[in-house]
Image (spheres, grey):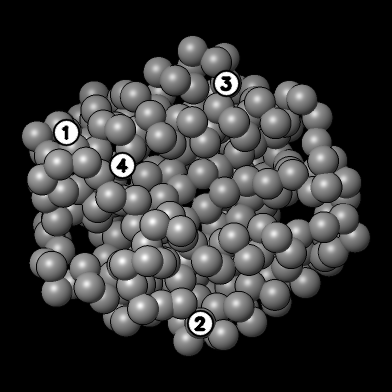
Amino acid sequence: MIILKTERDLEAMRPACAVAGAVLDDVAGFVRPGLTTKQIDEFAAARIKDYGAKSAFLGYRKYPCHICVSVNDQVVHGLAGDRVVEFGDIISLDVGVFYNGFVGDTAKTVPVGGCSVQAQRLMDVTEQSLYEGIAQAVAGNRVVDISRAIQNYVEKNNFGVVREFVGHGVGRKVHEEPQVPNFVDGKTSPKLRPGMTLAIEPMVNAGRPEVKILNDGWTVLTKDGSLSAHFEHTVLITESEPEILTCRAKTLSKSKAP
Ligand code: MF3
Ligand code: CO
Ligand code: CO
């Protein structure tokens, strides 16, 4: 069942998404060569707490960290630990918070200090594919219109879009219906209606689309060792243009938090 959010729900959910966006920006600004991924996770935990929020990921299916930190060929769900990030690495940061009883879910990939031209192109294409998807997130379209726009843009740029993990509805829980694939899967696809809140989140590999899971049970890696990037926004379907709820500057002016 797809849960449509009321205006009252959205009054609570907008600030939750604004907090997620703010934490993501704060953490991205903190990233620098020489830090361990554990230090990055601890910084995120402190920022989440400062905003009076809670991590939506810590403890979710026993996930052990506050945010997801995925380096280079790690696609998503990287676990924070002793790994030191170096100049030239790219690092995907995924923040989910509970605030006001709702979840905000947002991610981006950033370079550590600097990166190769190819890595920057991967990040640019992945981010743009997210906006290509968001442009289709309008009432009357179907979820598959989002999926198709993302896949077409990624493949036109000769990168591989990950199939095994998908976007999703988001609200009082991290994962609600519907699934929002980043490719056309041929299944029947729900119509988009005002009040739906979707986490749209392309995961894009510089090489082949296939992934594998590390023996820690969480970390998703590219099978071919190529770099991977991940961008995500929580988006509201409206009567007109989609509203990006996790866009910090925009949502801050509409809400009291952070
Ligand atoms: N960040 C993922 C998403 O965007 C969910 C994380 S699951 C967790 O949907 F287990 F890592 F928390
Ligand atoms: Co996420
Ligand atoms: Co998500």
Q: CA distance from mark 2 to mark 4?
A: 29 Å
Q: Position of residue 133 (x, y in %)?
A: 35, 33
Residue 95: percent from left, percent from top: 52, 63
Q: Vertical placement of 4 versus 214: above or below?
A: below
Which sits earlier in the primary sequence, circle 4 or circle 1? 1
- Give the SS element for disc 1: loop
Q: Considering the image in quadrants, where does the N terminus appear?
A: bottom left
| Residue 195 or residue 168, whichever sits in front | 195
In the picture, residue 251 is in which quadrant? bottom left
Q: Which residue is mark 2?
A: 51
Q: Residue at x 11, y 67 (%)?
A: 6
Q: Amino acid at mark 1?
A: Arg
Query: Distance of mark 1 from mark 3, alpha carbons?
Result: 24 Å
> SS for tag 3?
loop
Q: Amino acid at mark 3?
A: Phe
Badge nearest the viewer, 2 or 4:
2
Residue at the disc numbered 4:
180
Question: Which residue: 55% across, 78% down?
Answer: 48
Label number found at residue 159: 3
Name the N-terminal-most of marks 2 and 1: 2
Q: Position of residue 88 (x, y in %)?
A: 84, 41
Q: Image height check: is 22 above or below 235?
A: below
Residue named by callout 1 = 142
Q: Earlier in the sequence, mark 2 or mark 4?
A: 2
